[in-house]
Image: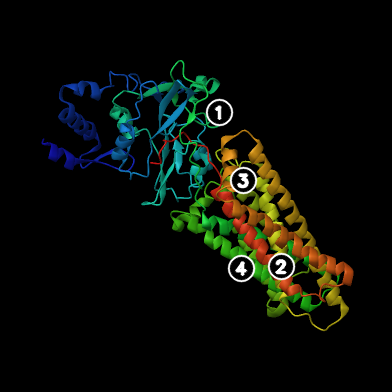
Amino acid sequence: MTPDDLLLKRKLNKKGHFVSKEKEETKKELLGQACEFIVGDRLHEIKGFDKTKKIPDQPLQEGEQYRFHFDATRCIGCSCCVVACNEQNNNPSDVQWRRVGEIEGGQFPHTQRLYLSMGCNHCLDPACLTGCPVDAYEKDEQTGIVKHDTEACIGCQYCEWNCDYGVPRFDERRNVVSKCDMCYGRLEYGMAPACVDACPEEAIMIEKVNIEEWKKDHEQADAPGMPDSSHTLSTTRITLPENFPHQMSGVDQHRLEPQHPHWSLILMTVLTQLSVGGFFGLWVNDLVLRGLEATSYLKSLLGTASLAVFFAGALALGVSIFHLGRPLYAYRALKMWRRSWLSREVLFFSLFSGLATAYAALWWNELSLNLFTFPAWTKPLLGSLVVFSGTAGVFCSAKIYMVPARPSWNTPKTLIRFFLTALTLGPLFTLAIFASFPLPKTAAMVVEGLNFSVLWLCITAISAGFLQLVLLMSSFLDLVQKKNYELNATAFLLTRRFRWHFSFRLGSVLIGAVGLPLILVLHYFSEGTFFSLSITRLSFAACTLALASELLGRYLFFVTVMPKKMAGGFLKS
């Protein structure tokens, strides 16, 4: 058989398995012929296990799994492993499953530089698997290898946020995430992974690890320039020089770059929170105005506001799918609602959307359509369900971002911030809708009801806006004071590259969410009514400034986060 015939007979599929026109039993024979053609008299070594100990010479026993062993004393930083990995998996240059970083430390003249070659660590508790909403990851029960199914992936990139090491990589050509799988297709045939084979210094090897023993002592997974292994229990064993400087760090720590803004997520999170806060304000107003025996004019205000708030929420949910690499498969995100916060967010906001539609329909049925007759308690009960499902959705949204791999996000303040956004924007948006209606010349009951509604909305917005200011300042002080590289880097970006954005964020909250509504409240207590002042202009100005502030704040939330990651190179690759 000629080499050309052999190449025509075998090919690699996307998972690395050999696929042949021959039957299953001929696969190993074809592989053996390929190896014989390539290496000649070393065929007996490759058919079994490599005698150079690049891979184990004994099968896995119960309670064991494969892992990488990286020897930093051997690595010369040539990046042959990176090239071999990309060649093997047909990846573009910007999608690297294995990367080489550099760490340095010591005091002159006793300085030292080491290299770190890292792929997937095939953790015992992989965060990428736990957070995936479509179950695209699996940890192989026999080998312990963490595999990724590109067919199931929807390209949400949530696994990128969860992984401390930045292992999953988004492939813009295919709009899905991909990652190192230890070339398990090669391991099945007793061949070393591409990176292991390509290393000229034999700095990378495959070995077995006892899972229970490693859980008790995984100190060898830690190294300078690497995140703490205790979160996901990385299995990669790293060998360091005996007398290396302990104050070593990544040579790329000087390079602080903004992260992707995720514009669709900015709009989605802010507008869904506006919608939830708006329905909360409407529900409370409905309960109180019902007690005041409000006129049809007041009901028309609430009905129109409910429709506007509903459309804001619908727009947010419509925009959200554009964050996905494969938007047509967005429905798959419901699959893992028992485990993934992203799946739970989709579930609760889907429920919120349906209930909000029914709630708005009840308002318009009562005001103009009169197609159906419902008991008086139906609308308040439905409103409470809308508020509950929306609140649960906002809670799940916040939990998505509270991951250890993103330190500035991983705080309860993220949860509080999301709810304060809802309580700031929702009332101000509703107030702007109310103010756009001309006041009718009717009984005092209308003015009394409107005064209460405006007062309630203004006080809610002022309280939330003030707390938002306090939270922003306290969060910034935490970023500055804590001795944490990622948190300090976020503070650096806020005060240097994005200082004007951050200043406008603080100023617009102060004016839009606190100052202008406070003017309305003070005027009410001095005049006894809101409607002798230009409420329309003030309301629209307050809503516009507050909305701009929250959109800008969410933009800063995404671009200034500094993720945990392994050390990189001095120059950007």
Q: Is residue 287 visible?
A: no
Labelled disc at residue 230 = 1
Residue type at mark 3: give it: Lys
> Circle 2 sits on which residue?
430
- Label 4 or label 2, whichever lies nearer to me, is 2
Task: Please report the residue visible at 75 percent of the width from the left and 60 percent of the height from the top.
Answer: 514
Give the secondary structure at mark 3. Answer: helix
Q: In 3D space, how far apart are the residues under numbered discs 2 and 3 (Cα atoms)?
A: 27 Å
- Label 1 or label 4, whichever lies nearer to me, is 1
Question: How far across and how far down the image is residue 219, in percent?
Answer: 52, 21
Labelled disc at residue 311 = 4
Q: Are marks 2 and 3 in contact (CB under 8 Å)?
A: no
Give the secondary structure at mark 4. Answer: helix
Labels 2 and 3: the sequence-earlier one: 3
Labelled disc at residue 540 = none
Question: How far across and how far down the image is residue 104, in percent?
Answer: 46, 27
Question: How far across and how far down the image is residue 31, in percent?
Answer: 22, 32
> Circle 3 sits on which residue?
399
